Amino acid sequence: MPAGPLGVVDVGYPVFASDWASDSKLIVGGGGGEGKNGIKNKITLIRAHKSGNQEKPVEVKDEIVLPDGEDNPTSLAVHKDLIYAGVNRSQQKVKANENDHLRVVSMENNELNSKNVFHSSSVDEYQKCTQASASIVAFCSATSPGTLYAVSPKDLELLYSKKAEGEINDVHISPEGSKVAFCTAKKIVVLETVSGKQLLTIDRPKEGDKSFSKIRFISEDYIVAALNITGKKGVVLSKYSVSDGSVAVSKKLSSRIKAVVAFDAQGKFAAVGTSDFSIVIVSSDNLKQLFMQTQVHPFAITSISINPAGTVIGSTSVAGTVHFLDIPADGEFHRTRATVKWSVISVILTLLMAIAIQFLVKQQIIDALIPNRSLLRFSQPVSELVETASQTSTMATETIAPIIEEDAVEKEEDDDIETESVTEYVTRYVTESEASPSDDRED
């Protein structure tokens, strides 16, 4: 069977970080920040039922509302049911160097511990790219040049720090926990986890038009990097040997993909979140592109995470949507015309929504329906709404043509593929991917 949507949840706030607590529990965090915009800062537990025999395949199971007057979670990692999150205190406390930004949280007992590791009074410094294992919690500062910090998961005491030559874009710990790595635009640096001893430095390709954006260990011996080509001209994935830094394989993704914004790898697969709100799945072994789902979110993707079993992909967005993509049990991505059909349908629905927004705004119907603009969750000037709708219309139109062309090629190659009608497919998709209502949550 092809990969397909397992479900979508709207948590009601911009989501900036995610990590799996188990094969079925995804932890997400985000919010409106310190400003008085009415959007709370939260950490939410979402359960995804892959078995398909549940009434709600995905649903919110628990939620922590963080204190008012503080920043939203900017990154988080989960290890043994403990959530290690980066959450700045108020700007007043940050300026006074009282910013215990590293928070340890559990869904049962809320905040358990906190620590000020940065010892900085800059309001521009926050915790990004948090990772956790049995031996360390690793994260970096958002400043340039950045610093990698490694602390003990038991007492949060600093084990070591490593200054980078530029802003740190990503951090990751190897599957068995023996190595930790970080990347800047120009280098990947691999360290021994416990001691912080530098083991390897990998320079970006000599052409100079590619920059390291994201990294993930796929084993103790190999690390995969996602590189953006300057000017949003594409994405290259490269698999490096951790022993000597040599390139095992390198591949450029589809020309339709302009930039990577999120990346994760687990087992046989790696997942790429793109700047045009799509998700691409590739083989961790040979980096071959296996599957692409377009228009997954209505706005920018902020994180992507594959569960430990490698069976479900969770992705998040500033729009507040958390999307779950089901990976086939057989690990084979059969891109049938039914899969293409779902992509076309989703793009058409997006196009129709954009056209409707344009019409309502131009006819001043929105003002009549919603006289109090403060009732809108993300209030925007009318000009911005029109511009967003126009851009979405253009993007949707440009996306449909290559999908239909690809479908025509597949039809020529294989006329025996089983298909279903558009009505049947839409009905099944709506039934299978219906998300739980935001007010129907268990305590």
Image (cartoon, rainbow, N blue to C red):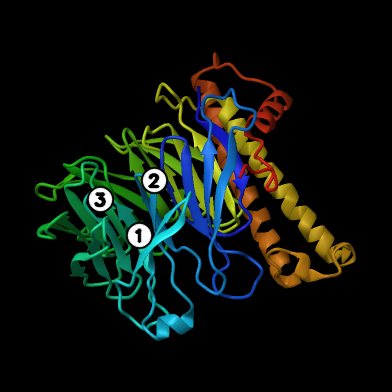
Q: Position of residue 65 (x, y in %)?
A: 56, 60
Q: Which amino acid does label 1 sit on?
A: Cys
Q: Which of marks 2 and 1 is in front?
A: 2
Label 3 neighbour load within 10 Å: few <14, some 14-19, many 20+: many
Q: Can residue 274 be seen in this view?
A: no
What residue is disc 2 on?
Answer: 81
Q: What residue type is labelled 3?
A: Ile
What residue is disc 1 on?
Answer: 129
Q: What residue type is labelled 2?
A: Asp
Quarter occupied by the C terminus: top right
Which secondary structure, mark 1? strand
Q: Which of marks 3 and 2 is in front?
A: 2
Given the current orientation, which residue lies at the most extreme top position?
Answer: 416
Q: Is residue 154 visible?
A: yes
Which secondary structure, mark 2? loop
Lateral position of residue 379 relative to residue 172, left or right: right
Lateral position of residue 375 relative to residue 256, left or right: right
| Residue sitting at x 74%, y 64% | 376
Asked if disc 2 and disc 1 are in contact, CB closer than 8 Å, the reply is no
Give the mark, 3 or 2, whose residue is nearer the N terminus.
2
Cα–Cα span, label 3 and label 2 = 18 Å
Lateral position of residue 328 relative to residue 77, left or right: right
| Residue sitting at x 53%, y 63% | 66
Q: Position of residue 442 (x, y in %)?
A: 62, 42
Give the mark, 2 or 1, whose residue is nearer the N terminus.
2
Q: Which mark is residue 173?
A: 3
